[in-house]
Amino acid sequence: MSLLDKAAANARILTRRELATLLEWPDAHELFAAAYEVKCREIGKRVSLRGLVEFGNICEKDCFYCGIRKSNTAVRRYRMDKDEIVREAEWAFKAGYGSVVLQSGELSSESNTVFVEDVLRRIHAFGGDDFGITISLGEQAEETYRRWREAGAHRYLLRIETSNPTLYARLHPADHSWTDRLECLRTLRRCGYQTGSGVMSGLPGQTTEDLAADIEFFAAEDLDMIGMGPYIPHKDTPLGKNTALSPAERAKRLELGLRMIAATRLHLHDVNIAAATALQALDHEGREKGILAGANVIMPNVTDIRFRSDYQLYEGKPCLGENPVLCKGCIERRITSIGETAVLNGRGDSPRWEKRTSAAKHASIG
Ligand code: SF4
């Protein structure tokens, strides 16, 4: 039995060496096709949509790779007000997106906690339990996570960026702790969130072994959702200055991002995996390619175009001038063009999470 067949037949049995072999599989198309088959079997030929609202770019952190890090004075800062955020979430709801994702830079003040709580309550009031609310608001105290969960959020994305603490330390200032971030992920799970994380691929100094270890990390933490993207340098950051990618490097970076999706699908089988917008920044059809390599979630941007260009974690972000109505039509056409169906009016929860919660229910009934 070939390694691809072995991975497709049994979830979560590969060793780190075997994961590295998948990541370097000689025929990329063969790798993607095997992962896509697993995606179709586990999830169907369906893509879940989440309307993405990037509601603020003010951040207390200073990650060396990020375009909205607090030390970047070249960026114009913004924060939408509550009415604007709720209006965009409502637009996504009415457009049939089964979920919304609220994302911003990291802020840890009590006033921010209350602000987000209010927004979540208002969205939950019109969307009810059938409208998914994912938040991605960084590292917070357990009490904050609990308050946001009670206010209506039920999924949380917190990317670990790399499972290698030494590499993490090279990408962040000394007061950014990999261990604290890991602890936050575990706290989110305890608070009852569907928990998502992810990494960047193509980082300076990162090895295939590191990426294989990242996939092992996803399995060990039993994550429900994975959001990964290729690293794309931003010129106004310590890591990205003077490192613009050549066309050949962009193609290589895209392929590595797709290989990560495929190897992750082949190892984990039943999690949600996003085809990140960063893939599209590298290739006009990057997100479709992500789906065909095993991803099953796309997050069309519903943020007002007045703000979009100010929320650039990396350079070359696509669709900066495309309003949400155009984005919706465009993304549905793209999904149909590869023989997949966009799921409308469904939360698109992670199958992994559904299995875990239904097993827990049965155990408590039994
Ligand atoms: S990566 Fe996130 S936490 Fe780090 S500076 Fe950017 S927005 Fe802030």
Image: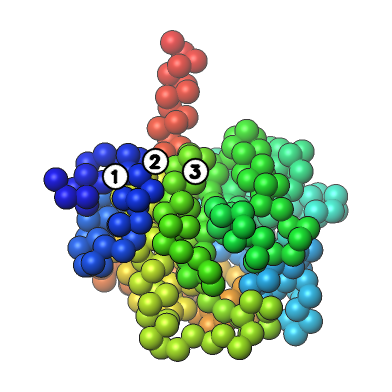
Mark 1 belongs to which amino acid? Glu
Left-right relation of 337 to 184: left
Of marks 1 and 3, which one's residue comes earlier in the chain? 1
Of marks 2 and 1, which one's residue comes earlier in the chain? 1
Left-right relation of 10 to 284: left
Q: Quadrant of residue 254?
A: bottom left
- Crowd rating for badge 3 (residues with CA inside 10 Å; few <14, some 14–19, many 20+): many
Which mark identifies residue 351? Answer: 2
**Residue at horizontal 64%, vertical 85%?**
241
Judging by the rendered image, the residue that carries numbered circle 3 is 223
Query: Which is nearer the eye, 216 or 250?
Result: 216
- What is the distance, in whole Å, between disc 1 and disc 3 at their CAs? 16 Å
Query: Which SS class for mark 2?
Result: helix
- What is the distance, in whole Å, between disc 3 and disc 2 at their CAs? 11 Å
- Given this view, does label 1 or label 3 mark the residue nearer the observer? 3
Residue ranking furthest to the left? 1
Q: Is disc 1's CB within 8 Å of ligand 1?
A: no
Mark 2 belongs to which amino acid? Pro
- What is the distance, in whole Å, between disc 2 and disc 1 at their CAs? 8 Å
Spot occupied by residue 299 in the image (x, y as percentages of width and height): 48, 63
- Given this view, does label 3 or label 2 mark the residue nearer the observer? 3
Which mark identifies residue 42? Answer: 1
Left-right relation of 172 to 329: right
**Residue at horizontal 50%, vertical 65%?**
206
Query: Which is nearer the eye, 340 or 203?
Result: 203
